[in-house]
Amino acid sequence: MAIPKVNRQGILEALKKFDETMRASGEWANWENKANHRWAINYEGKSYPPKKIISIAAGVSIDDFSGGPQSNDYLEARGFSVVPLPKSRLNVDLQDALNSTKMLNIDSILLRFLKQAQTNNLQTADYPKDYQEFVLKVSFGKGNVARIPWIAILGPGQEVSNGIYPVYLYYKERHKLVLCFGLSETNRPALNWESDVVNKYELVSNKIDRPERYGSSYFYKEYDLDDEFNILNSTGPDLQKDLNVVLSYYRNSMIADGNEIEDYLIIESFI
């Protein structure tokens, strides 16, 4: 059924009611870690269950409408951010995460990457070899300087030439840095991104006019650069949050395909 119309204020009141009367209850305590929840409203540093919030605001049962696209589109149309929940087998607190050797700041990697992309230096040996539980690969070209340098984050069994992976593409001539749900061009990957990515996000070729390469990947976000090749209008936490959203989709895609991935960290301050 169609969800009854409720304005943004009605949703805000439902968030407040959830905090005051439900968040600490047995049913909803630690709801994010329960297997039947895949999405969360991200509002002022807290996570909320989308269907429950809509149910409270609209006065209907959660059985009367669908989760996923129907609920998410309803909330996003009212200005709320809805993000996928990672499927974790290991939860650690924020301090443990910050102390972990798996925790890297993507903004520092991107800054170095963008600066080097302005040179003829193709060396990548000094870049990190992994990012959280994934393999991290950087390329500025092989033998010749690439027109589109990239940073790819690869899960088990995935390769840049044959697989799916989160990827930063730097379209040098266009002065654009783009975060994408990447698909290999050399070989058609056996694994595809989960349906929520395919149905929700546009192809790079629809967002960038006649891209030189990687037009079949899915576009997540574009970042503006200043004349010194610094990223504008996005702080380190903003960049980390964006990447965490794409990584969450990636983990879900890998799990749906039956791939085993190592335990990883939920960084609460960025999700």
Image: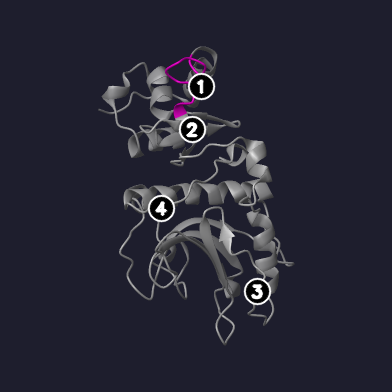
Label pair 1/2, CB-CB below 8 angstroms: yes
Please name whichever residue, 92 or 243, is drawn nearer the observer in this view of the structure: 92
Residue type, mark 2 in image: Ile
Q: Quadrant of the N terminus?
A: top left
Q: Determine which residue is flagged by label 4.
A: 201
Quadrant in which residue 61 is drawn: top left
Mark linked to residue 41? 2
Crowd tier of the residue under label 2, counting other residues whose Cα lies within 10 Å: few below 14, some 14–19, many 20 or above = many
Residue 155 location, x and y as percent? 45, 59
Decide: is 87 above or below 101: above
Which mark is drawn over residue 15? 1
Q: Residue at x 43, y 68 (%)?
A: 159
Residue that label 3 marks? 117
Q: Is residue 35 above or below residue 24?
A: below
**Residue 213 counted in the magenta span:** no
Of the two numbered discs 4 and 1 on the same chain, state the one appearing first in sequence.
1
Q: Amino acid at mark 3?
A: Ala
